[in-house]
Image: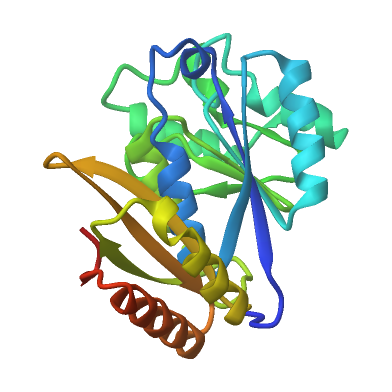
Amino acid sequence: MTSPDKIWTAGLIVIGDEILSGRTHDKNIAQVASWLQVQGIRLVEVRVVPDIEARIVAAVEALRAEHDYCFTTGGIGPTHDDITVDAVATALGVPVVIHPEARAMLERYYATRGGLNEGRLRMARVPEGAELIPNRMSGAPGIRIGNLFLMAGVPHITAGMLDALTGTLEGGAPLLSETLGCWVAESEVATLLREVEAAHPACQIGSYPFFREGRVGANFVIRSVSAEDLARCSAALAEGLDAQGLAVTAGGI
């Protein structure tokens, strides 16, 4: 489901004290962003918030109002500090209920794993009116309600939930990219980058410097929703770098 002329956007809320304390390194931002690009949706804002209901509520209210889609990761597990469902229900002004299908999923999953106890049953709680996002890894489903998507914090479980959502969201044309690498300080080609980008308004050029093998270099990533514009912009940048006597490596260094 695509609408090529519209730029669809999403916000992501990463929830958890463990992220903010540095005990856990987040991997979900990158995988959510990459998955969204394939769906033709751009991740344009990320907020990291603690396990405090008021902070989660404020982030949900803001991001769902500003973007076409809002995703959350973390805080939908079985423990007392997993409060994402409660916070989202508060933000939406609806009660929290036990989803019968989610309960049945958990009963089946835990039938040979000690049964469904009070903690595990918490993972069947959803804001009233929500649908489920399948989770093949641990039985506990993700949650979808309106333009909100509540997903696990564990990256490989999040990946499975994203896979289940593939192709179900309305989006625009996927963002395409091409990378050119060069052994040059980005400051030496800043004017060229600015001029090439200005001449190709349908494209964006990102510059990513690095220091490797005792040398300074940079990779230039050109992005566009149009394959034709992308090709023209990439060719113009390559020609400009070559004109300065710089060797260009297609695909990056």
The C terminus appears in which quarter of the rendering?
A: bottom left
Q: Find the residue positioned furthest to the left.
A: 213
- Counting from the top left corner in percent of width and height, residue 151 is at 52, 38
- Counting from the top left corner in percent of width and height, residue 87 is at 73, 25
Q: Quadrant of residue 251?
A: bottom left
Answer above or below: position of 230 versus 81: below
In depth, the one of 120 and 92 nearer the eye is 92
In depth, the one of 164 and 104 nearer the eye is 164
In depth, the one of 198 and 161 nearer the eye is 198
Q: Quadrant of residue 51?
A: top right
Q: Find the residue positioned furthest to the right.
A: 93
Answer above or below: position of 188 versus 108: below
44 vs 119, left or right, is: right
- Give me the residue at 43% from left, 14% from top: 22
Answer above or below: position of 142 versus 146: above
- Counting from the top left corner in percent of width and height, residue 137 is at 32, 40
- Give me the residue at 31% from left, 68% from top: 180
Residue 135 visible to an observer of this rendering: no
In depth, the one of 15 and 218 nearer the eye is 218
- Counting from the top left corner in percent of width and height, residue 222 is at 44, 69
